[in-house]
Amino acid sequence: MIKIYHNPRCRKSREGLEYLENSGEPFEVVRYLDNVPTMDELATLIEYLGIPPEALVRKNEAIWKEQFKGKNLSDSEIIEAMVQHPKLIERPIIVKDKKAVIGRPADKISILLD
């Protein structure tokens, strides 16, 4: 089953959701701001994405700039920051099996649908 980690207030996330709706594939929507992933869940998503944790951080968010920017943080501290402040998580994240992509732009989702 495909999952999309979605923020309905984000235009890019809404575009990713629309892409999935148009694909005809069944999927589950996870509103990650309401249902925040645990440290383990987020670490697994990062593993599926094949990126370092910092690459999943929205660095233009005020929370990042005020509390974390310029600090030498471990991977686990970065993941903990995203769990504590889920607005920092880049979106949308689409997961299928043990692979994931950040759906920016939305057509990147096609990688998982082939």
Image (cartoon, rainbow, N blue to C red):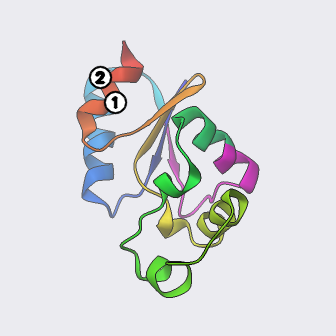
Residue 109 shows which numbered tag? 1
Q: Is residue 104 above or below residue 113?
A: below
Residue 40 magenta-highlighted: yes
Residue 81 magenta-highlighted: no
Could you tell me which residue is drawn at 41 percent across and 69 percent down? 59
In front of the other: 77 or 103: 77
Could you tell me which residue is drawn at 27 percent across and 52 percent down? 12
Work out how far the residue at label 1 is from the one at label 2, CA to CA, in angstroms: 10 Å
The C terminus - image quarter: top left
In front of the other: 96 or 1: 96
Residue 23 shows which numbered tag? 2
The first of marks 1 and 2 along the sequence is: 2
Q: Name, please, the residue furthest toward the bottom.
A: 66
Could you tell me which residue is drawn at 48 percent across and 68 percent down? 87
Labels 1, 2: front one:
1
Secondary structure at badge 2 equals helix
* In this picture, residue 33 sits left or right of residue 6: right
Task: Answer few, some or many: residues within 10 Å of disc 1's Cα (few below 14, many 20 plus, some between 14 and 19).
Answer: many
Q: Residue 14 at what x, y percent from top left?
A: 29, 50
Residue range (magenta): 28-43
Q: Residue 68 at what x, y percent from top left?
A: 55, 78
- Residue type at mark 1? Ile
The N terminus - image quarter: top right
Secondary structure at badge 1 equals helix
Could you tell me which residue is drawn at 53 percent across and 63 percent down? 33
Q: Residue 81 at what x, y percent from top left?
A: 63, 70
Q: Is residue 94 above or below residue 60?
A: above
Q: Are marks 1 and 2 in contact (CB under 8 Å)?
A: yes
* In this picture, residue 54 sits left or right of residue 6: right
- Residue type at mark 2? Ser
Task: Answer few, some or many: residues within 10 Å of disc 2's Cα (few below 14, many 20 plus, some between 14 and 19).
Answer: few
